[in-house]
Image (tube, rainbow, N blue to C red):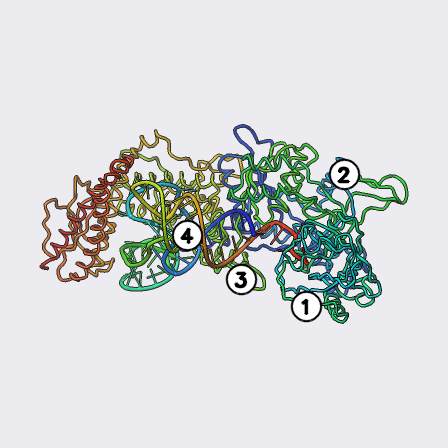
RNA sequence: GGGCGAUUGGCGCAGUGGCUAGCGCACCGGCUUUACACGCCGUUGGUCGGGGGUUCGAAUCCCUCAUCGCCCACCA
């Protein structure tokens, strides 16, 4: 740190140290090093989409992971932070398909064929796949890049197929024609979790049907989907409904299609809500989940009238066939009206399921798909309920438990090409499930691929070499922490837990930290269309990665959404600069680095800052244990800025600019001790600048050279002071009282300047009347902190009238100036304080006069109240005296 | 329809029965004080969403209402 710039310049520093860490294998986990003394710590990254770019959500999520990883290294653990990317089935395929269509390469994927399309996607992946990884490095992420995985890697693919085969053999996977959520745009089935319910402004159509057996009797039906009438195969009513009981078992005429007006049985079903609409439901088993079940119970057939891409087919009749489902709705309503069957239409708000990716209404559809019965359900549910696995914030465990209690089979096949092919082969009626195609001619592999999450759920162990019992797997599984968003608690977290138990016989991670959602400062979700989503790389360029990390962490309380404001990053930048300059100041004082601290020469301020440091270590360490990162940054911010810089460093100046070399050397030693600890406490949050300063100040000298040199990355995490340490340096409680009183006096003394309207730079004379024995050092420091020309200690000082006075337990401070005081303003100020004190006194007097209070309150509270009252009365006396001084001035 | 969360000075948050309700930002006033104007010093500002209850004592516990947000749910 020969030439230290006045302001911290992050760019060069960041690149330099990241390369250094990588070159020295600082991020590489070695299972061989794991031992009882060196426990393993592991965390797997939630793999970002391979073609994605870094956004603020990634910043939040990965900063937290990096904090945990770096803290664990400093705790002396062998750390594996395992990175990777996800191939993101539908998302990636749609992006590439759109691009190819735009470029005129194809109009539809069928033109190109499976292999050619996959080639294009791989090409795209190679081109854009590395971006996000490089961006994570910019953020400072200390991942073990030598273990980078991709969900479409050959080995990973093997794992996915192996799992499928295993589940198939266990009888947990089956194929069946069932109702699934069908996306008419992506032409694939979706799991329930991929369907988003949205409220829609729809219409409720009322129409009538004639009862066959009772001419003249009509049933009124309310529906939102008249276009599916041709697919109706029954009419259902509630058996308890007195209006319709006698009609059960009879038939009604289905009005559409006009060329085939079938007779439908009127059936009873408890599911029907008597209150809703007319209490009569048209049953369309092929196009509604509930209707499908009613149809099954009633034993009626299912007639499909809508095609895979959402159009009406021939069975819908001449009037509707070929129309899009939404056009058909209008056409069907019009037809009913024409027939005189439409009674009325009402505006109606209902919830409609949308495809998460394609954002079009899904179509419940009868389709041949693969389904999975979740394995290891009970264990997975129990481990969270009984606390073996902990969720932070804890409340998500309720959500988890609720979902685990209502598991439905999972539709895992997708009619896409980009993904893991289902390892099943067919030949005529024959079916074979296995990793390889069976011997012989004519076998055709199932064309479908597996749901994205059906691969992601193996992430914690499939990335570690499973099914081989690799050292990595042995030492680092189960992982320690998982950091993810609560939006994928079902998609991913729950399924990983089940997979972990099923194939490893153990939970996949011990703690799950759920981040909040990043929003803008107005609380809106970040989105491209709103343009409120800042580019993290730009922020890093402008403020530095440390600033971004610190700012984000500082505003991300556990369990709440993060209202992100660029101001936070600016604050992080300012903070780094403050840290930089404090170290720069140290550097300017010269002297030996990290000298021995001599207990005999410690000043009250030295002891005080050591005590504050001890407190900060405790707070930050506790905050880490509770995953409360805002608390950690808050404690550090306060300690470093308010306590260390504002008070300690300022008080050091009395010594640094004085002429007591022994004391100066000692203060420097304390400074280095505190700074060395402070840098380490900051390192997980501010990896770059702390490393730069660690080296710059020479604190790395005593570090063991066994790993990547003398980096702060592996410096030991500070420990709270032991008793013998406190005794050795005489860090007893009385220090706080002394120094607090001193600070109070100084603040009050500075205030006297404001009263006298004297600029801080102007050297002035103060007189102090100490309350007790006064150490010359204290006089020196107070003088320095007040920027006083002189500070005369005078036990017997009797101030003249009109003298502004400041006081604390330390003593009284006078500013003997004439004509500079706005007496009335000062009287008002003191009067205000007096009012406050009077209220306080009244409150405590009231309390202490209350018999119940005195009898029932715990002794220490009673004592506190008495002390407090006495203090207030004394203060009142002082204030009154101050008023006296002013009077007559 | 169920469940969860939030409601504390202008903004964002801390504070889960007991000292004077804290912090950051913003605001206001003053400072080119030789680490830092990405800074320093000093102020101002809150009857803790409303109501009720328990208690010697409530921001904190209970009940209730309100507003906002999220999740779950097959009323067509």
In front of the other: label 1 or label 3? 1
Whether pointer 2 and pointer 4 mark residues with C-beta atoms closer than 8 Å, the reply is no
Which quarter shows the C terminus of chain A?
A: bottom left
Residue occupied by mark 3: A532
Q: CA distance from mark 3 to mark 4?
A: 25 Å
Residue A168, which numbered label? Answer: 2
Residue occupied by mark 4: A575
In front of the other: label 3 or label 4? 3
SS label for mark 1: strand
Q: Report the chain holding disc 4.
A: A
Whether pointer 2 and pointer 1 mark residues with C-beta atoms closer than 8 Å, the reply is no
Residue occupied by mark 1: A344
SS label for mark 3: loop
First in sequence, mark 3 or 2: give its number. 2
Nearer to the camera, A600 or A525: A525
SS label for mark 2: helix
Residue A307 seen in the figure: no
First in sequence, mark 1 or 3: give its number. 1
């Amino acid at each position: 740190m020969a030439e230290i710039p006045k302001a911290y310049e992050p760019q060069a520093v960041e690149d330099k140290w990241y390369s250094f860490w990588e070159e020295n294998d600082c991020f590489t986990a070695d299972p061989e090093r794991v031992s009882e003394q060196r426990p393993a710590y592991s965390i797997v990254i939630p793999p970002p989409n391979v073609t994605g770019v870094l956004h603020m959500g990634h910043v939040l999520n990965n900063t937290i992971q990096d904090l945990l990883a770096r803290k664990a290294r400093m705790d002396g653990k062998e750390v594996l932070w395992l990175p990777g990317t996800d191939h993101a089935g539908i998302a990636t395929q749609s992006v590439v398909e759109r691009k190819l269509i735009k470029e005129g390469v194809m109009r539809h994927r069928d033109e190109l064929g499976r292999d050619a399309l996959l080639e294009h996607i791989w090409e795209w992946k190679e081109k854009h796949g590395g971006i996000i990884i490089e961006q994570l490095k910019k953020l400072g992420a200390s991942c073990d890049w030598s273990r980078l995985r991709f969900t479409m890697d050959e080995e990973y693919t093997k794992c996915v197929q192996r799992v499928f085969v295993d589940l198939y053999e266990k009888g947990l996977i089956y194929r069946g024609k069932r109702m699934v959520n069908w996306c008419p745009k992506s032409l694939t089935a979706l799991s329930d979790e991929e369907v988003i319910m949205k409220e829609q402004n729809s219409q409720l159509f009322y129409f009538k049907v004639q009862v066959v057996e009772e001419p003249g009797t009509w049933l009124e039906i309310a529906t939102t989907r008249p276009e599916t009438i041709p697919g109706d195969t029954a009419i259902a009513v509630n058996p308890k409904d007195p209006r319709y009981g006698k009609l059960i078992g009879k038939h009604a005429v289905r009005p559409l299609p006009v060329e085939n007006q079938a007779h439908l049985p009127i059936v009873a079903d408890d599911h029907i809500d008597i209150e809703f609409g007319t209490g009569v439901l048209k049953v369309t088993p092929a196009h509604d989940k509930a209707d499908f079940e009613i149809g099954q119970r009633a034993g009626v057939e299912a007639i499909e009238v809508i095609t895979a891409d959402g159009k009406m087919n021939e069975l819908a009749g001449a009037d509707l066939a070929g129309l899009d489902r939404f056009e058909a709705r209008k056409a069907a309503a019009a037809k009913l009206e024409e027939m005189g069957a439409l009674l009325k239409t009402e505006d109606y708000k209902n919830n409609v399921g949308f495809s998460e990716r394609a954002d079009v209404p899904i179509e419940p559809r009868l389709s041949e798909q693969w389904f999975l019965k979740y394995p290891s359900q009970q264990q997975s549910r129990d481990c969270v309920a009984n606390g073996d696995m902990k969720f932070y914030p804890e409340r998500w465990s309720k959500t988890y438990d609720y979902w685990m209690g209502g598991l439905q089979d999972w539709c895992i096949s997708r009619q896409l090409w980009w993904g893991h092919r289902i390892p099943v082969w067919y030949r005529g009626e024959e079916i074979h499930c296995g990793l390889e195609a069976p011997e012989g001619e004519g076998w055709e592999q199932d064309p479908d691929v597996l749901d994205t999450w059906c691969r992601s759920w193996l992430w914690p162990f499939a990335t570690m070499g499973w099914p081989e019992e690799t050292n990595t797997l042995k030492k680092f599984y189960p992982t320690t922490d998982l950091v993810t968003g609560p939006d994928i608690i079902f998609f991913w977290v729950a399924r990983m837990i089940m997979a972990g138990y099923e194939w490893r016989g153990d939970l996949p991670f011990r703690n799950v930290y759920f981040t909040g959602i990043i929003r803008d400062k107005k609380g809106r979700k970040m989105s491209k269309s709103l343009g409120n989503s800042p580019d993290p790389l730009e922020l890093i360029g402008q403020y530095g990665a440390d600033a971004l990390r610190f700012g984000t962490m500082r505003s991300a309380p556990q369990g709440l959404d993060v209202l992100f404001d660029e101001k936070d990053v600016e604050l992080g930048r300012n903070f780094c600069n403050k840290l930089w300059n404090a170290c720069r100041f140290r550097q300017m004082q010269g002297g030996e680095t990290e000298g021995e601290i001599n207990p005999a020469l410690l000043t009250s301020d030295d002891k005080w800052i050591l005590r504050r440091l001890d407190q900060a270590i405790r707070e930050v360490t506790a905050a880490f244990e509770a995953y409360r990162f805002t608390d950690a940054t808050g404690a550090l911010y306060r300690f470093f800025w308010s306590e260390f810089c504002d008070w300690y460093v300022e008080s050091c100046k009395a010594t640094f600019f004085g002429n007591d070399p022994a004391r100066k050397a000692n203060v420097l030693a304390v400074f280095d001790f505190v700074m060395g600890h402070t840098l380490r406490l900051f390192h997980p949050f501010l990896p770059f600048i702390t490393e730069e300063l660690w080296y710059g100040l020479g604190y790395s000298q005593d570090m063991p050279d066994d790993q990547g040199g003398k980096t702060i990355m592996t410096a030991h995490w500070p420990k709270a002071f032991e008793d013998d340490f406190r005794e050795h340096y005489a860090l007893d409680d009385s220090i706080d009282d002394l120094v607090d009183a001193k600070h109070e006096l100084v603040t009050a003394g500075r205030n006297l300047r404001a009263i006298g309207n004297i600029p801080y730079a102007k050297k002035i004379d103060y007189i102090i009347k100490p309350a007790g024995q006064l150490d010359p050092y204290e006089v020196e420091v107070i003088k320095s902190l007040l920027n006083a020309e002189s500070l005369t200690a005078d036990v017997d000082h009797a101030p003249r009238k009109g003298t502004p006075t400041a006081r604390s337990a330390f003593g009284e401070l006078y500013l003997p100036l004439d004509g500079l005081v706005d007496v009335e303003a000062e009287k008002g100020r003191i009067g205000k304080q007096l009012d406050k004190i009077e209220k306080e006194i009244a409150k405590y007097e009231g309390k202490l006069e209350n018999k119940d209070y005195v009898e029932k309150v715990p002794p220490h509270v009673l004592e506190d109240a008495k002390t407090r009252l006495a203090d207030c009365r004394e203060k009142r006396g002082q204030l009154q005296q101050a008023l006296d001084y002013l009077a007559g001035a």
